[in-house]
Image (tube, helix red, strand yellow):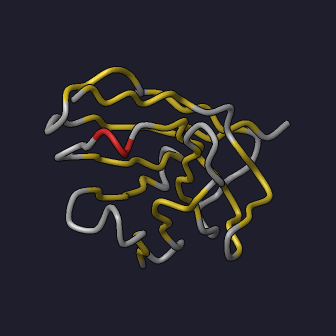
Amino acid sequence: QVQLVESGGGLVQAGGSLRLSCAASGRTFSRSTMGWFRQAPGKVREIVARISWSGGTYYADSVKGRFTISRDNAKNTVYLQMNSLKPEDAAVYYCAGEIVGSSADYWGQGTQVTVSS
């Protein structure tokens, strides 16, 4: 059974930082694109960042320069370092594996990120 388990969400003040982690089990994702999506209340789920098996990255314009995605294939884990957080970054963040375009074959359960102004 494939599982993606996120951790690291929480409450932070605007301007602060959080680091999300996503540990995968049940299969290796070392040759797959992994990443993070987010969904705020009343909004459509959007991709935040993704990283290919070779390390190539993509970021949504809204997070460029503030967020950094990375992965540790030996640990089957992907990370999202979020700096200079803004209230508009508040959402449930989902880890995803085998990303193709704006969808994915595997999803985590989500972790809440709340940013107070």
Judge left or right: residue 115 versus residue 65: right
In the rendered image, residue 19, in percent from the top left (x then y), is placed at 31, 37
**Residue visible at 67% across and 56% down?**
97
**Residue visible at 49% across and 44% down?**
75
Q: How many marks?
A: 0
User: Furthest residue to the right?
Assistant: 1
Judge left or right: residue 96 versus residue 115: right
**Residue visible at 42% across and 27% down?**
9
- Residue 90 vertical placement versus 63 (above, below): above
* Quadrant in the rendering for residue 20: top left
* Quadrant in the rendering for residue 66: bottom left
**Residue visible at 53% across and 72% down?**
53
- Residue 99 vertical placement versus 94 (above, below): below
User: Furthest residue to the top?
Assistant: 11
Judge left or right: residue 99 versus residue 90: right
Name the one closer to the observer, 85 or 104.
85
In the rendered image, residue 84, in percent from the top left (x then y), is placed at 17, 46
Which image quarter is the N terminus in?
A: top right
In the rendered image, residue 110, in percent from the top left (x then y), is placed at 61, 33
In the rendered image, residue 109, in percent from the top left (x then y), is placed at 68, 31
Judge left or right: residue 105 versus residue 66: right
Name the one closer to the observer, 7 or 53.
7
User: Furthest residue to the front?
Assistant: 42
Which image quarter is the C terminus in?
A: top left
